[in-house]
Image (spheres, grey):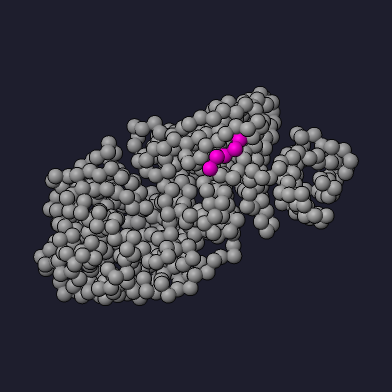
């Protein structure tokens, strides 16, 4: 018992818990007290950014039932048992000086223990949630100790249950956890908590197993480019958050681990994917939420001024609760440095991000073409999301729910929920249920080139029934020109059905051959064919369903098809110009096309793209009077000066 109290006092002093309240930003106090008052009444709202299955509908439990399900969703039960809400109660006590909130937090722990005299398999003890719950209990204990809320008997009850739950994680461990966010969250919890419960932890078999397994998990799960292999930013962040917790709590004791490098790479990959508002795109099973708090914790742990630039203005309440007021002071004193790099090239994961600048008014492009990932991965190969001047324009339609009985779950994982092409309305990436797939295509290696503010991204996808190859080339001339070139090869006659999903805040207005995107300064020139606008469901946050506009185009082709889609600022004039072979013979559009983007009387950009190999005639080409031999070039004209930029040789 003396060791436990000494451990809690040690953590409380390291965190400067007595200084916590004065560091909480006033804008966060209201929410803390709102949630704390609800929790006093046993009313639960799961609204945190990293609540994996958010539920904004309040549900009240007259009597605590830890296996209760609400909202027709078993995930509600899992959220209840994770106890991510304990910090609301504890912070409310620190802010108010009233221990009733902290006492209620303690009562939740003791009630759960009384309901679980032994740890056995049931909804309330699922292993993922057990790892999260024990971490939340552990983080609450130094605060409860500081507030003098724990008797010796209560502390013994709580820590004995924690040890039983951690042992249960080991006996319930499955081989698949080596590659799963479930596994790394569990082992991070064990490694974080045991040293503060057991005096001789370094000789403890469970601790040594968990540390070794955690290091193996991070070496497997994190690609060299820093992306988590599961292809879902939400779960990338869950692993990152728990990796950072493990580094922090091990670091307090002077312990080291080989996960430092992969956790730092996870943080960097997230940082370079931040949208202009500091959020994440709904890639895979992800919500559109702000991720700056994650960068705040990364800035402190890795002493990185770039992460500080991406973090919150002041230390947010969750970071303060985890890392302590001492780290808040360190964070406030840190320099902030805007990165020079505007691109993230995920050559291992197939995730690419390009931005025009680091302001909240930036233009932004996300392009994806990697492996499927885990059950959290979607059929999003060759998908593009984009923002213009900070405004979401083309989006990923989200996830909505994990319920097996809800048809929208499978629909939002499918190809039709992403910005791409399906032949004959027969997708070759086919989700079968909430977590599985009946079929999937084959992505090929991607090609990317950056030339100052001009960017080229290309990937291909191989489908079947019939055999087909879809190659997408995206040219982004920052900040206001996007040209999407789609080449499809499939023997026989087919109908190509292309979808573009727009943010729910936008509307499209047809104006002759183009659409004006109301709410932005953009127009869209769709590919050739028939166009139709529909309103369809999307879900940018778990359990929240919205309606958004979707533009459908259809065209029929035989054997090969090339189509061009353009989005650009409405004050840019778009013209078709010829590409010449042997400098004097206009090429067929089936072989090469070029579009001129006129910014003013003095300046233009012309993008020329070859769709096929030139296997007859001379190989010298020209466009806008500039000779070249390449697959894609840009001719930039400014007054009487022309520059040729080769994007793909």
The stretch in magenta equals 515-519
The residue lying toward the viewer, choosing from 282 and 82, is: 282
Indicate left or right for 128 with 152 as reference: right
Residue located 26% across and 60% down the image: 87
Indicate left or right for 57 with 578 as reference: left
Q: Single out the residue that lies furthest toward the top.
A: 493
Residue located 12% across and 63% down the image: 154
Vertical position of residue 244 compared to residue 467: above or below: below
The residue lying toward the viewer, choosing from 621 and 120, is: 621
Estimate the x, y position of residue 189 in percent, counting from the top left. 31, 60
For residue 469, which quarter of the picture? top right
Residue located 46% across and 32% down the image: 536
Give the dominant element type of the magenta stretch: helix, strand or loop.
strand
Counting labels gives 0
For residue 403, which quarter of the picture? top left
Indicate left or right for 82 with 110 as reference: right
């Amino acid at each position: 018992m003396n060791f436990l109290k000494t451990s809690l006092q040690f953590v409380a002093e390291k965190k400067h818990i007595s200084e916590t309240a004065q560091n909480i930003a006033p804008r966060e106090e209201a929410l803390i007290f709102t949630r704390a008052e609800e929790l006093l009444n046993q009313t639960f709202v799961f609204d945190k950014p990293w609540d994996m299955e958010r539920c904004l509908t309040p549900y009240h439990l007259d009597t605590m039932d830890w296996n209760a399900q609400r909202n027709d969703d078993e995930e509600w039960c899992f959220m209840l048992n994770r106890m991510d809400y304990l910090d609301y109660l504890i912070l409310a006590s620190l802010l108010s000086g009233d221990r009733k909130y902290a006492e209620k937090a303690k009562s939740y722990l003791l009630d759960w223990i009384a309901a679980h005299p032994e740890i056995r398999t049931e909804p309330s003890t699922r292993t993922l949630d057990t790892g999260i719950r024990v971490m939340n209990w552990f983080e609450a204990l130094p605060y409860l100790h500081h507030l003098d809320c724990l008797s010796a008997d209560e502390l013994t009850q709580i820590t004995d249950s924690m040890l039983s739950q951690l042992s249960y994680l080991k006996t319930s461990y499955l081989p698949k956890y080596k590659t799963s966010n479930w596994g790394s969250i569990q082992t991070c919890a064990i490694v974080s908590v045991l040293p503060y419960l057991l005096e001789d932890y370094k000789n403890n078999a469970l601790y040594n197993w968990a540390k070794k397994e955690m290091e193996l998990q991070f070496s497997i799960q994190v690609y060299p480019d820093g992306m988590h292999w599961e292809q879902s930013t939400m779960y990338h962040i869950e692993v990152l958050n728990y990796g950072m917790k493990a580094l922090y709590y091990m670091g307090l004791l002077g312990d080291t681990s080989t996960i430092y490098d992969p956790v730092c790479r996870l943080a960097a990959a997230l940082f370079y994917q931040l949208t202009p508002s500091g959020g994440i795109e709904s890639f895979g099973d992800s919500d559109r939420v702000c991720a700056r708090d994650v960068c705040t914790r990364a800035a402190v742990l890795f002493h990185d001024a770039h992460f500080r630039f991406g973090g919150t203005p002041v230390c947010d309440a969750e970071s303060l609760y985890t890392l302590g007021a001492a780290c808040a002071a360190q964070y406030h004193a840190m320099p902030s440095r805007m990165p020079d790099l505007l691109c993230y090239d995920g050559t291992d994961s197939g995730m690419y991000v390009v931005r025009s600048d680091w302001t909240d008014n930036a233009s932004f492009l996300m392009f994806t073409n990697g492996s499927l990932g885990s059950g959290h991965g979607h059929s999003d190969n060759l998908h593009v999301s984009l923002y213009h001047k900070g405004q979401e324009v083309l989006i990923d339609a989200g996830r909505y729910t994990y319920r097996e009985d809800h048809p929208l779950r499978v629909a939002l994982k499918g190809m039709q929920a992403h910005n791409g092409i399906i032949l004959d309305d027969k997708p070759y990436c086919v989700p079968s249920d909430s977590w599985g797939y009946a079929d999937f295509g084959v992505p090929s290696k991607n090609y990317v080139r950056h030339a100052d503010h001009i960017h080229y991204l290309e990937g291909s996808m191989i489908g079947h029934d019939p055999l087909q190859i879809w190659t997408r080339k995206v040219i982004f001339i920052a900040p206001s020109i996007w040209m999407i070139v789609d080449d499809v090869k499939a023997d026989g006659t087919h109908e190509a059905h292309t979808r573009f999903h727009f943010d729910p805040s936008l509307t499209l207005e047809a104006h002759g051959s183009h659409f004006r995107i109301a709410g932005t300064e953009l127009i869209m020139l769709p590919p050739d064919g028939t166009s139709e606008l529909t309103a369809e469901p999307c879900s940018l946050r778990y359990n929240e369903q919205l309606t958004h506009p979707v533009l459908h185009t259809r065209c029929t082709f035989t054997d090969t098809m090339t189509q061009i889609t353009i989005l650009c600022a409405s004050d840019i004039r778009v013209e078709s110009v010829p590409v010449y072979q042997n400098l004097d013979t206009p090429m067929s559009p089936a072989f090469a096309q070029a579009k001129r983007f006129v910014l003013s009387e003095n300046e233009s950009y012309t993008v020329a793209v070859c769709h096929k190999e030139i296997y007859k005639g001379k190989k010298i080409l020209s466009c806008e009077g500039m000779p070249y031999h390449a697959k894609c070039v840009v001719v930039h004209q400014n007054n009487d000066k022309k520059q040729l930029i080769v994007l793909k040789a």
